Image: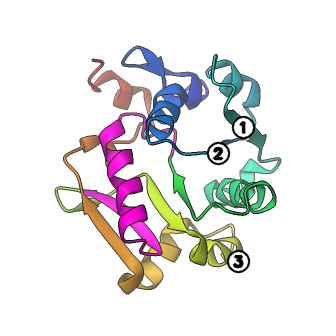
Amino acid sequence: MGAPKAALRIGGATFIARVIDGLAAARLDPIVVVAGAHREAVTEALPGRDHVRVIVNRAPERGQLSSLKVGLEELLMTAPNVAGVVVALVDHAMVTRATVAALVHAAREDPAPIIVPSYAGRRGHPIVFMRPVWAELLATPDSDSARAVVRRDATRVREVPVDDLGVVRDFDTPEDLMVAPHG
C-alpha cells in the first residue's frame, strides 16, 4: 500500500480507528491492538483512544498468525476472565458496527468455539475465537494460519449471515482503496 494500512484513511477515519470504533461500540473490553514494524503509525492513528492497549509483535515477519498469538498471550496474562476474542483485521476497515454487534451477540447467546460472519455465502472477518480454541491457535505453526484452525472441524464453527460487504472486502493494494466507497 506504500504506507502502514492502519494509518490510511477511508470514510473520514483511519483504518484502525474504524476497526476500533466497531469493537468499542460492541462494548468489548479489553481492546488490544497488535502492531508490527509500524507501532508509532498505529498509535498516532488512534488519538483519544486511551482504552486501547497497543502491543508489539517483535517478529512480524513470522506472519499474521504470530500477531494473533501475541495478542492471545497478552490476554491470557492480563485478562483471565475473557471468554473469547474478536479478531478484527485492519485491512477489513469497512466492517459495520452492526456486524461486530451481531457476532458478539451470537457469541454471548450460543457460544460456538468459532464464530464467523458470512456475506452472500462467503465467510469473512472479523472472527470470534472462544477460549476453548486458544490453545490450538497458539500451537498452530506460524507458517500456517488461523484459517487452518477454522477449517479443522466444521462442527465447531457457527456462521452468522450478515448484510455487510465489509466482511469480505479487504484492502491490499492502492487500487482496492480507489474503488472503495468513501461515505
The structure's colour scheme is rainbow
Depth-wise, is mark 2 or mark 3 nearer the camera? Answer: 2
Residue that carries the numbered disc 2 in the rendered image = 30
Q: Amino acid at mark 2?
A: Pro
Task: Say which residue appears at 75% left-offset and 36% top-offset.
Answer: 37
- Spatial CA distance of label 2 from label 3 is 23 Å
For the magenta stretch, what is the residue range? 89-118
- Residue 113, given in percent of the width and then of the height, sits at 47, 75
Q: Amino acid at mark 3?
A: Ala
Residue that carries the numbered disc 3 in the rendered image = 139
Queried whether the magenta region covers residue 100, the answer comes back as: yes
Residue that carries the numbered disc 1 in the rendered image = 53
Q: Secondary structure at mark 2?
A: loop
Say if residue 85 shows up in the picture: yes
- Residue 142, given in percent of the width and then of the height, sits at 69, 67
Give residue 110's quadrant in the image.
bottom left
Q: Is residue 166 above or below residue 84?
A: above
Q: Is residue 123 above or below residue 178?
A: below
- Residue 131, given in percent of the width and then of the height, sits at 60, 71
Count of numbered labels shown in the rendering: 3
Q: Is residue 179 left or right of residue 103?
A: left
Q: Is residue 18 above or below residue 97?
A: above
Q: Earlier in the sequence, mark 2 or mark 1?
A: 2
Task: Say which residue appears at 50% left-offset and 41% top-offset.
Answer: 27
Q: Is residue 169 left or right of residue 165?
A: right
Depth-wise, is mark 2 or mark 1 nearer the camera? Answer: 2
Q: Earlier in the sequence, mark 1 or mark 3?
A: 1
